[in-house]
Image (tube, grey):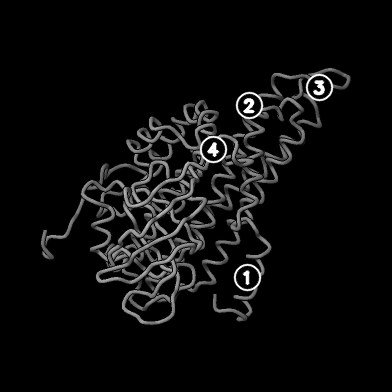
């Protein structure tokens, strides 16, 4: 390959529509749900499901067409993740946190790096651990990366791992800053510390720790990790210049928080399914005896949870749509301020809150049988409870940050 012959991979299905992609996830819902207990036990979804997801193209939804992806928008992507999570929230979470970083590779890395990362066949999935718990020592041609990163969701079937480590930015001699370092599989060790009851919920997300022992990472596979705060260049990001799509302008708050909200909304939809089954098949405990679906109390609880879940999905899609519109506006005006991304982030947080509230209501009124080990409703409740411990779920912190941006009291 020469500079005059850049790598291009034909899109796998150039005529596939977003709706057809989402329909594939719907078609796999029952299989995903059936495997959920084993997914929890082993700590991640099976090789069989991974093969089905690969064949369906789920990992390529946000990937550039130039490198074998579908290059669909965030609205399609989040709807897809919601459908996968409707089958099993852990599975949807793992697919999301392994596949959404195609967006960051396509936005921030050079053409040379993208050709290498997406590779000759275009198959790429990689978790990114944002906490800089490792070091990147500059050496000739690149960096020596060392460290251990926990909660690397989606690592089970990953082709790469993106580690955030402290080091001098490429081409500078300044103080250490967080760097995003892309390591191919085989250059890191996945630790056996996830699944089998190790956590309250999200046990099937493949969130194992990853250890890196002095692996060499070439300089072109390292970028400063400032993806939520960077100043947009007048000409856009490397990804926009390469792909000509404002999707790859790289503003990252929306995708980070939407990727957490979508599995919670899927959990709410799964909980609604289970609750409906309970209402149709069980009778009230207090007289007069009747099917629970005939009881005004259960009707009210179901209707409220259904409305909360529908609203959550609508807000999720609206935030993705607003984000997309902001990118198109940048093409016209050159303006895509970080505050726009932050407000979309706020919408994603509210979407997750609505869905979590729905799950709370369903679990609390689903009866004691719903709390037993093996209950699908219990699993949804545990998964959402685990989400609430995530730093990305601490809405009050981010709402205050949005206000500071609005009033000009902070730059990011």
- On the image, the x and y values in percent for residue 356 come to 66, 46
- Whichever of labels 3 and 2 marks the residue nearer the N terminus, that label is 3
Which residue lies under the disc numbered 3? Answer: 284
- Whichever of labels 1 and 4 marks the residue nearer the N terminus, that label is 4
- Whichever of labels 2 and 4 marks the residue nearer the N terminus, that label is 4
Q: Residue at x 63, y 48 (%)?
A: 311
Mark pair 1, 4: CA separation? 34 Å
Between 337 and 146, the one lying in front of the other is: 146
Which residue lies under the disc numbered 1? Answer: 401
Q: Is residue 244 above or below residue 197?
A: below
Between 195 and 202, the one lying in front of the other is: 195
Q: Quadrant of the C terminus?
A: bottom right
- Whichever of labels 2 and 1 marks the residue nearer the N terminus, that label is 2
Q: Crowding near pointer 3: few (<14 within 10 Å), some, many (20+)?
A: some
- 343 sits to left or right of 145: right
Determine contact: label 3, label 1, CB under 8 Å.
no
- Whichever of labels 3 and 1 marks the residue nearer the N terminus, that label is 3
Q: Nearer the viewer, mark 1 or mark 4?
A: 4
Query: Helix or strand or loop: what does disc 4 sit on?
Result: loop
Mark pair 3, 2: CA separation? 22 Å
Q: Quadrant of residue 214?
A: bottom left
For residue 378, the mark is: none
- On the image, the x and y values in percent for residue 407 come to 63, 79
Which residue lies under the disc numbered 4? Answer: 195
Mark pair 3, 1: CA separation? 46 Å
Query: Helix or strand or loop: what does disc 1 sit on?
Result: helix
Q: Is residue 31 above or below residue 234?
A: above
Q: Is residue 105 above or below residue 236?
A: above
Query: Helix or strand or loop: what does disc 3 sit on?
Result: loop
Q: Crowding near pointer 2: few (<14 within 10 Å), some, many (20+)?
A: few
């Amino acid at each position: 390959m020469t500079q005059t012959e850049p790598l291009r991979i034909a899109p796998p299905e150039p005529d596939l529509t977003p709706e057809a992609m989402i329909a594939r996830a719907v078609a796999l819902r029952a299989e995903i749900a059936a495997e959920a207990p084993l997914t929890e036990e082993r700590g991640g979804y099976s090789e069989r499901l991974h093969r089905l997801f690969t064949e369906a193209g789920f990992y390529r939804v946000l990937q550039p067409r130039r490198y074998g992806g579908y290059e669909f928008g965030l609205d399609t992507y989040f709807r897809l993740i919601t459908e996968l999570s409707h089958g099993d929230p852990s599975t949807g979470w793992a697919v999301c946190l392994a596949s959404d970083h195609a967006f960051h590779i396509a936005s921030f890395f050079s053409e040379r790096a993208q050709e290498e990362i997406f590779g000759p066949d275009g198959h790429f999935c990689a978790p990114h651990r944002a906490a800089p718990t490792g070091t990147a020592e500059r050496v000739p041609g690149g960096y020596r990366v060392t460290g251990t990163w926990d909660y690397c969701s989606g690592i089970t079937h990953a082709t790469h791992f993106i580690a955030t480590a402290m080091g001098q930015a490429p081409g500078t001699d300044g103080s250490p800053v967080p760097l995003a370092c892309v390591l191919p599989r085989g250059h890191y060790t996945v630790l056996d510390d996830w699944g089998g009851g190790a956590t309250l919920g999200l046990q099937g997300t493949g969130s194992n720790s990853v250890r890196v022992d002095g692996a060499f990472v070439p300089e072109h596979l390292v970028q400063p990790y400032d993806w939520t705060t960077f100043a947009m260049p007048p000409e856009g990001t490397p990804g926009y210049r390469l792909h000509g799509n404002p999707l790859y302008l790289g503003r990252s708050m929306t995708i980070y928080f939407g990727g957490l909200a979508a599995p919670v909304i899927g959990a709410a939809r799964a909980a609604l399914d289970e609750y409906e089954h309970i209402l149709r098949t069980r009778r009230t405990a207090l007289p007069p005896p009747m099917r629970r679906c005939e009881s005004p109390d259960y009707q009210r609880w179901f209707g409220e949870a259904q409305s909360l879940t529908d609203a959550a999905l609508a807000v999720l899609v609206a935030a993705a749509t607003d984000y997309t519109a902001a990118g198109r506006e940048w093409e016209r005006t050159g303006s895509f301020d970080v505050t726009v991304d932050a407000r979309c982030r706020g919408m994603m947080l509210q979407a997750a809150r609505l869905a979590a509230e729905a799950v709370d209501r369903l679990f609390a009124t689903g009866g004691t049988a719903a709390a037993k080990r093996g209950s699908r409703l219990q699993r949804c409740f545990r998964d959402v409870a685990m989400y609430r411990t995530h730093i990305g779920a601490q809405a009050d912190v981010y709402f205050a940050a949005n206000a500071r941006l609005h009033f000009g009291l902070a730059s990011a």
